[in-house]
Amino acid sequence: MPYKLSATLSAHSSDVRAVASPTENIILSASRDSTAISWKRSSLTVPFAPSSILRAGSKFVNAVQYIPPSPEAPQGYAVVGGQDMVINIFTLGPAQKEDPEYSLVGHTDNVCTLNVSQSGTIISGSWDKTAKVWKQFQLVYDLKGHQQAVWGVIAIDDEQFLTASADKTIKYWVQHKMMRTYEGHKDAVRGLTLIPDIGFASCSNDSEIRVWTMQGDVVYTLSGHTSFVYSLSVLPNGGIVSGGEDRSVRVWRDGECVQMIVHPAISVWAVSTMPNGDIVSGCSDGIVRVFSESQDRWASAAELKEFEDHIASQALPSQQVGDVKKSDLPGPDALLHPGKKPGEVKMIKNGDLVEAHQWDTATSNWQKIGDVVDAVGSGRKQLFNGKEYDYVFDVDVQEGAPPLKLPFNVSENPYAAAQRFLEQNDLSTNYIDEVVKFIEKNTSGVNLGASSEYVDPYTGASRYQAATTSAAPAPSTAYMDPFTGAARYSGTPIPTPPVPSVSPSAAKIIPYAKFVSFKQANVSAMQAKLYQFDEALRNEISTATLAMYPEELEIIEEAFTYLSQVTSTTSHVTLPPLGGSHAETIIQILERWPAAQRFPMMDLTRLVAAYCADASAAPGGRERYIASLFKASDWTEVRSHGKAMSKAQETNILLLFRTIANCFQEGTPVDEGQWVEQVFEALSHTPYALLTKVQRVAVATILFNFSCAYLTTSVARDVVNQHTGLVFQLLRSNTDDAEVTYRTLVALGNVIYAGNTRGISLDSAQTAELQTVMSALPAFPDDRIRNVVGEIRALL
């Protein structure tokens, strides 16, 4: 008999990420709703009902296993792991406590998989790239050897283990020693199950299931899933059950798929089998389902009809069922011909709709499984850092350097994706709006069966929703500024790495002496924009005299050639560093060019300051350089009149601040000349209300970089007082940006720390003002800000 729906268990409010069914009357499920549930029934004729709701915290739970009964726990234990990195052991039954009986601490990232041996030995796998073995609730083995997250684990017995990883390999361990590595999958390996008398089976994001001997031979490969396969279990008769991203559970016997059970959800995250042969599934719709071959355990006819109708009403993304060309599809008459094998999918054109139907061997009929909608992205989902995404954009941030990867799912909140991208690449969070614009400009899609706000926190897998939007084109390989969406250079450079933060349990951050720089750039695009502006000036009679002179063109060409080499990861620097002639030429051009055309030259100064600090090192050179930059940006006009900035002023002032931040770097003499006082004087009484967020971050970076220099260099007390005054101004005026406040606080902490080591403390007035400022700080949720405030108070 075919498997049909037996029971529907609804209590979770979000994705069911793991299921275990150790007996015919117990089911355990774990969900991203932060709970695990123990379901029980007294007999096969009584419905399952929640008997225990297990909650150890507020974070996602995505692994659950069962420890058989013992004298200490007559009804057994539930083993639960998740995003809080802790493995919690709950006693089941009447004696169950609200809190876990044991908590196993040791992993440093999300616990994503668990398994338990017959005698109760626990093995856990984590995003921290390790597996750990626990006996008597104590850590006994650390299994280290995988290069990426460990997504599948099996305890063969108390001394032998298998682990599967996003690094595409499976490893066999005896105690803590790695004995064998199994290679063959083309993508991340997601799940494992033991196969009696053969060895084990593995499933992967390559959509295949492999059955192996313990010696490493592949007995056979099961192909049929059309997307990632997440979970495996073995039936009492030796058959294999699998579940995956193509919303199906598949039953395999003797190397063939004998049944495909379609679910009204996108992901079947987990499957388990009962001793009586029933199948349990956990899905992205938050429901646990039980399927049975025994007609006695099938749901009522009305429930079966409701389940089938629910499936038929779904929308399928076309990449799940193959490429769709509507004009080539047959009409409904094609369903008069029987299918060739169980689970065969046929698409037909029914009016303007494309329908997918599956061959049901039990009824010898075609069952509608959904309406096909246009594909999301450019085809099959892609894997990035062990997680799945609809899009993985190549983002060019520097000429000659490898592009950064920007992964995104169509259902994901673009701000969450942008935040993840910036953090993973040490880029400033102040560019989040620009990244969001880039994502929205280059993506569109459809979503099925889940909230558009949802994105799976563990794999990044996407959701779809029926819509009329067509598939988005594949990302262009041409350069596009990812932060402005412009196809050409726009004068808005790639952002800087933020000042590193620390967790409450990490080491203190102050003193922190690593300078932050604004070095990223597309040099060739910058050069092209500069020459474009120069040509425009040259071709107009009224501006022809402003264009670059032949000798200036030669010097600027030298500057770009050098910077192209020094910023490239593929070429060697063969030219000498830029010098005074280059700095002087830049100054002369800035002084005569119109404000709207200055930004490529202002940006060039940013790179010169970063890579050629000695270009303005001649006596008085830095002072002249700084003065010309403030003048070219119209800073004095903006500061004195307090009016909203024009677009040209906004861009030029941002580049001014970034250039000055780059002037403070390791080895730059902050105690020579007057240029530091000059900078602080120009920034005093800054109209912070007029500054954009990115401008404020740049100002905060100036203050931070000076503090790094002050840690190792003595500076006049008056200069330090200027710096402290600017810090107070910025802290008082910034009420909505945590990054600005954090950098400014670290700058203040560095200065106080350096002063203390030299016996120079804040005076009473400064101390009083500091206490007032810190007491008035906005209630940012960031732990890092609270940590630094605590460190500053300790320094006082």
Image (spheres, rainbow, N blue to C red):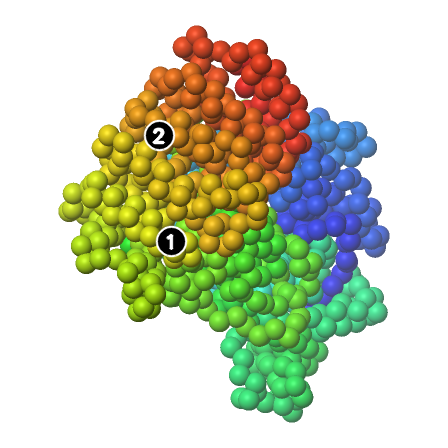
Reading the chain from its start, which is encountered first: label 2 or label 1?
1
Residue at left offset 69%, top offset 70% = 314
Q: Is residue 535 visible?
A: no
Residue type, numbered disc 1 = Arg
- The CA span between labels 2 and 1 is 22 Å
Specify whether 35 is left or right of 303: left
Q: Is residue 87 above or below residue 384?
A: above
Residue at left offset 30%, top offset 24% = 672
Q: Is residue 15 visible?
A: yes
Q: Nearer the viewer, residue 340 or 619?
A: 619
Q: Look at the image and tell me in which quarter the C terminus lies.
A: top right
Count of numbered badges drawn on the protein:
2
Where residue 735 sits, quadrant-wise, is: top right
Specify whether 79 is left or right of 752: right
Q: Secondary structure at mark 2?
A: helix
**Residue 409 % position (x, y):** 56, 58
Residue type, numbered disc 2 = Trp
**Residue 212 % position (x, y):** 43, 54
Specify whether 377 is left or right of 48: left
Residue at left offset 35%, top offset 17% = 714
**Residue 5 % position (x, y):** 74, 63
Where residue 335 sits, quadrant-wise, is: bottom right
Q: Secondary structure at mark 1?
A: loop
Q: Residues within 10 Å of mark 1 (few under 14, many from 20)?
A: many
Q: Is residue 574 above or below residue 447?
A: above
Residue beneath disc 2: 675
Q: Residue furthest top?
A: 759
Residue beneath disc 1: 598
Q: Residue furthest front?
A: 542
Q: Nearer the viewer, residue 451 or 753?
A: 753
